[in-house]
Every structure is written in structure tokens, then in C-alpha cells.
Amino acid sequence: MLKLYSWNVNGIRAAEKKGFLDWLAATGADVVAVQETKAHPDQLSARLREPAGYATHWDWAEKKGYSGVATFARTAPVASERGLGDARFDHEGRTLIQDHGTFVFFNIYFPNGGRGPEWVQHKLAFYRHFMTRVQAYRAAGRAVIVCGDVNTAYAEIDLARPKENVKTSGFMPEERAAMGEFYTGGLTDTFRHLHPEAVKYTWWDQVSRARERNVGWRLDYFFVTPDLLPRVVAAEVHDDVQGSDHCPISLTLDV
């Protein structure tokens, strides 16, 4: 079995103080992807930069304290690439693409459109370019796994208050339509595939203490291409895990 986790940690240095490394060790995961690290590797402790038992790769933003992703893998990838290969996006530290031989692994912190219409358009352009990269790997016959914080709740079941949020970035019609192109392009949402009726959220607003009332959004996903779908054993939301405004999600594959 191949066990993978994804978690928007909302600051990797803060997460370390809250027990992130203990959580990492306890997962027994083969690959762990984290988003919104908000740090350059040089700002991290040696234990966090290179946890025991994992080969670690980082992508960071030019702007300090912003964005950033990291991938921890028990078996080092054959190759690791920072960014999507487009200057419009790659200064933001949002993407790691790794070749693990039997699959290509995307760890992505997708843009948030909440700062205004121009950011929504930036987010949609990011979605489109991301899919060109996925399609290129599919055309080459490669199996692909994608995970991360997509910053969109796709369906009404994926957020507690859909009617009130139709005009809110993260549930706007154009964002949901753009995310729908992931599915028509060959990606499957593994959690919804296995749990079509389950109501689970992965993000809660901290200001309003929404987690206490479970007024949340499902913004974090694991996607796979069709060649991997028969191998999906489990896809879970670990909403009992504290330490961030998001909770971890996991995917288990029979390889």
C-alpha cells in the first residue's frame, strides 16, 4: 500500500511548534505534501528541513512569509521540479512536481481569489495552465496524482452554507466551472469517488470560530488519473487533527 497525505499547515514554523513532526512520524506515510509553508528553507530548523526518514523538497515564494509548499517522501523522487513552468505563477512558490517512476506527483497550493476580481482571473489562469501540465503527462502515458489546497468547493455538499456564498470566491460559478475542467480533463476527486454522500470539510474560518460549529468548506483534494482509479483503496478527511485552519487529508493506493 502507498499512503499519501496532504495538509495546508498555514505556516510550517507555527506547525512545528504545535507538534507537526510528531504528527508526520505518526502517519507512517510514504509521501506527505504540505502547503502554505510561509517560509524559505533557510528559516527552518534542521529537523524540519530534513525530517528523519524523508527526502524533502521545497518551493518558496519570492515574497517572505507567503505561500510555499514542501513534499516529504520516504523514497526520493527520480526528479523534482519547482513551479509550473510559467513566470506568471512560479514566483509565488505554489508547486512541486515530482517523478516517482510509477506516477507523477503534483503538490499545489492553488491561488485564492478572495482579494478581488483580478485575483479570481489569476486563479482561473493558474487552473488552466495546471491542466496543460497534467494533460502533457497523460499524453505521455504517465499516471498522475494531484493534491493540495484548491481553494474552491466544487459542489453544494462541499460547504456548509452554499446559498450564502455563491458570490464569494471559492464558490463562484466561474471557479466551479474551471474546476469542473479538472474532471473533464481526466482527474477524479478520490474522496467524492469513494464517499459520494459524505459531508466533510477541510477548512474553517478561524475568526468566527467556525470549526467549533463545523461551518466549513472542503477545499483540499486528492485527484488521480484513470489509470490509478482502480488502485484507490481509501480517501479520508482527518478533521480531528488540529494545528491549522485546514485539516489533513489522505489517499491510500494499492500499488
Image: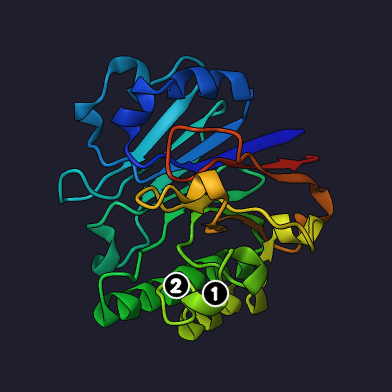
Q: Is residue 190 visible?
A: no
Q: Residues within 10 Å of mark 2 (few under 14, many from 20)?
A: some
Say left or right for 146 vs 172: right
Whether residue 148 can be seen here: yes
Which x, y percent locates residue 155? 63, 73
Percent of width and height locating residue 223? 63, 58
The numbered mark, 1 or 2, whose residue comes first in the sequence reads 2
Circle 2: residue type: Tyr
Q: Nearer the viewer, mark 1 or mark 2?
A: 1
Q: CA distance from mark 1 to mark 2?
A: 7 Å
Residue placed at 36% from the left, 64% from the top? 111
| Residue drawn at the location 59% of the way across and 38% of the way down | 5
Disc 2 marks which residue? 127
Residue at numbered disc 1: 179
Q: Amino acid at mark 1?
A: Met
- Mark 1 secondary-structure assignment: helix
